[in-house]
Image (cartoon, helix red, strand yellow):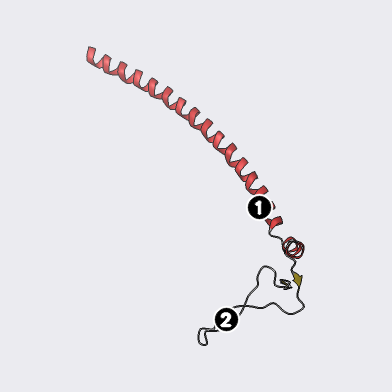
């Protein structure tokens, strides 16, 4: 009879212990999730800021202005040249994707 009471007592104490341990883990992981969500939101805001800066830096008008002011390039009145490989003839054409209407000044 004593062994049955002891077993019941151990089971009861174990269940109380594991219940409190489980609640503690839930609170701990909830705090960790909140912390990670804050980090995620700050990184997403930073990503949006960097994307807007990137779009400003790669704008065609900015590149053309820098090409004209810093590199001395001028706008060409001829159509842009393109490069492609003709597999049969092994010929090439020049493709200018970034600034197709600008050429370097050759002095």
Q: In the shown orientation, is residue 23 left or right of residue 66?
A: left
Give the quadrant of the C terminus.
Answer: bottom right
Quarter of the image with the N terminus is: top left
Q: Does residue 79 lie above or below 60 as drawn?
A: below
For image coordinates 46% across by 25% down, the residue present is 24
Q: Is label 1 in a helix, a strand or a loop?
A: helix
Of 23 and 76, the residue lying toward us: 76
Q: Is residue 89 left or right of residue 100?
A: left
Asked whether residue 86 is in view, the answer is yes
Return the mark for residue 92: 2
Q: How many marks do you count on the picture?
A: 2
User: In the displayed image of the protein, which residue is found farthest to the top?
Assistant: 2
Q: Residue at x 22, y 15 (%)?
A: 3
- Circles 2 and 1, Cβ within 8 Å, touching? The answer is no
In the rendered image, residue 102, in percent from the top left (x then y), is placed at 73, 71
Quadrant for residue 65, please give it.
Answer: bottom right
Name the residue rendered at 75%, 75% in the picture. Answer: 76
Residue 32's tag is: none
Q: Residues within 10 Å of mark 2 (few under 14, many from 20)?
A: few
Query: Whole-percent x and y of residue 4?
Result: 24, 16
SS of the residue under disc 2 = loop
The CA span between labels 2 and 1 is 35 Å
Q: Nearer the viewer, mark 2 or mark 1?
A: 2
Q: In which quarter of the view is residue 77 placed?
A: bottom right
Which sits earlier in the primary sequence, circle 2 or circle 1? 1
| Residue on which disc 1 sits | 51
């Amino acid at each position: 009879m004593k062994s049955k009471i002891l077993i019941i007592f151990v089971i009861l104490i174990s269940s109380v212990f594991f219940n409190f341990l489980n609640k503690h883990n839930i609170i701990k992981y909830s705090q960790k999730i909140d912390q990670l969500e804050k980090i995620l939101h700050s990184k997403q805001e930073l990503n949006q800021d960097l994307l807007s800066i990137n779009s400003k830096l790669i704008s065609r008008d900015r590149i053309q202005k820098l090409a004209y002011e810093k590199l001395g390039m001028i706008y060409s009145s001829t159509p842009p040249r393109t490069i492609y490989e003709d597999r049969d003839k092994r010929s090439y054409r020049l493709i200018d994707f970034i600034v197709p209407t600008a050429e370097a000044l050759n002095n």
